[in-house]
Amino acid sequence: MPDIPQRPTACLALADGTLFYGRGFGAPGQTTAELCFNTAMTGYQEIMTDPSYAGQVVTFTFPHVGNVGVNPEDDETADPVAAGMVVKWDPTEPSNWRAAEALSPWLERRGRIGIGGLDTRRLTRAIRQQGAPHVALAHDPEGNFDISALVQAARAFKGLVGVDLAREVTCAQSYRWDETRWSWPEGFGRLTAPRHKVVAVDYGAKRNILRCLASTGCDVTVLPASATAADVLAQSPDGLFLSNGPGDPAATGIYAVPMIREILNETALPIFGICLGHQMLARALGAHTIKMNHGHHGANHPVKDLETGKVEITSMNHGFTVDSQTLPEGVMQTHISLFDGSNCGIRMTDRPVFSVQYHPEASPGPQDSAYLFDRFAAAMAGRDVTAEQPI
């Protein structure tokens, strides 16, 4: 007998009325979000648990998702933060010695929706051409969908412009961090000989960033996104780190920028920022940020260091960017994207204050830029890092 087509159990509705039907996995239910795509070939668990994906459904362009399962060590925060995931092929049973669980039940326990069986190439082309759309994603094991209501829900989603999501993903209270990077065969280590005391402001910090700081000898105290300059200075730090995070930097900057400016004006502390932290630093220095058409999301993004001429392959995840045309005197652009020429790094010309748009901690992605953590440590040790070359 011929195969009877399986009834779709999930639906992705775009605000323009375009519909994609597929097979649902993970949690049943419905969510609205901005839709983006990620080109990384590995690290779906790290991507789903990256707080920078708050308010977004992620389309994975690489078809093999779920094949290595999930495990507690690869979480970048306690639970998935991305609203949902879109994949071409249904997740398979895991085949990996580190797998502790399959992807679908892991998503279900954490209330996150997945949809498989979609033409992700078509969807990715639509995102690139039309910009990141607002969508409604629904999963019903019985396959019952109110299409009109889904499209209306997608159209009602307010988007990410003007939205402060850092408050939603930041830590509730301060804490210490001393776990170092994973290595074979020991796994994660512990900081045993701290050399620098660092305050990390958590706008949605990934765990591997904190591990990279600890691995370079930093005794890290993490503070919530709403921390004041007085909160930071009460820790008597040797340096200030500004973390990654989601949402519109202009909205988060309402409370974050005054704190950073006070630190800049009242101290000579070295400052290092990543992703949203980069945007917060740029705004504190007087630059502007703008929403991108579809953002940068992947682990294969070439970035050029304008000071050395070297090209690094980087991991990225951002939908807003610093407008390099608005950088003030005394602040120089240090890195640019070779995809579209957008800003990817800045530094003050007379102080050890610098930041990058991309993710030198990888997880997932290449480690070409890991030297930046050593550069931050060198600045706290009193070395002139304006002439430091990549290690």
Image: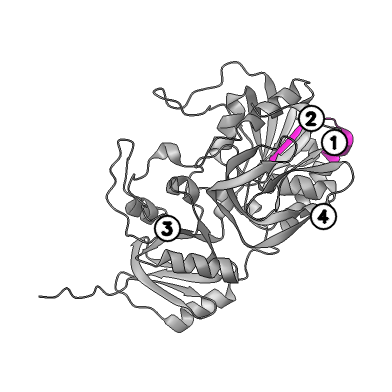
Quadrant where the C terminus is found in the figure: top right
Disc 1 and disc 4: Cα gap in Å?
A: 17 Å
Task: Specify start and end residues of the magenta stretch as a single range.
Answer: 262-273
Disc 3 and disc 4: Cα gap in Å?
A: 42 Å
Check disc 4: other Cα within 10 Å, few if <14, some if 14-19, many if 20+. Answer: few
Disc 2 and disc 1: Cα gap in Å?
A: 7 Å
Disc 2 and disc 3: Cα gap in Å?
A: 46 Å
| Kind of residue indicated by mark 4 | Gln
Disc 4 and disc 2: Cα gap in Å?
A: 22 Å
Whether residue 41 appears in this view of the structure is: yes
Question: At x 32% / y 75%, what residue is drawn?
Answer: 143
Mark 3 element type: loop
Residue 10, percent from left and from top? 37, 70
Q: Determine which residue is flagged by label 1.
A: 349
Q: Determine which residue is flagged by label 4.
A: 325
Q: Determine which residue is flagged by label 2.
A: 386
| Kind of residue indicated by mark 3 | Gly
Vertical placement of residue 226 versus 321, above or below: above
Disc 3 and disc 1: Cα gap in Å?
A: 46 Å
Check disc 3: other Cα within 10 Å, few if <14, some if 14-19, many if 20+. Answer: some
Q: Determine which residue is flagged by label 3.
A: 111
Q: Earlier in the sequence, mark 1 or mark 4?
A: 4
Mark 4 element type: helix
Label 2 close to label 1 by CB (< 8 Å): yes
Vertical placement of residue 175 versus 247, above or below: above
Magenta region includes residue 327: no
Vertical placement of residue 376 versus 303, above or below: above
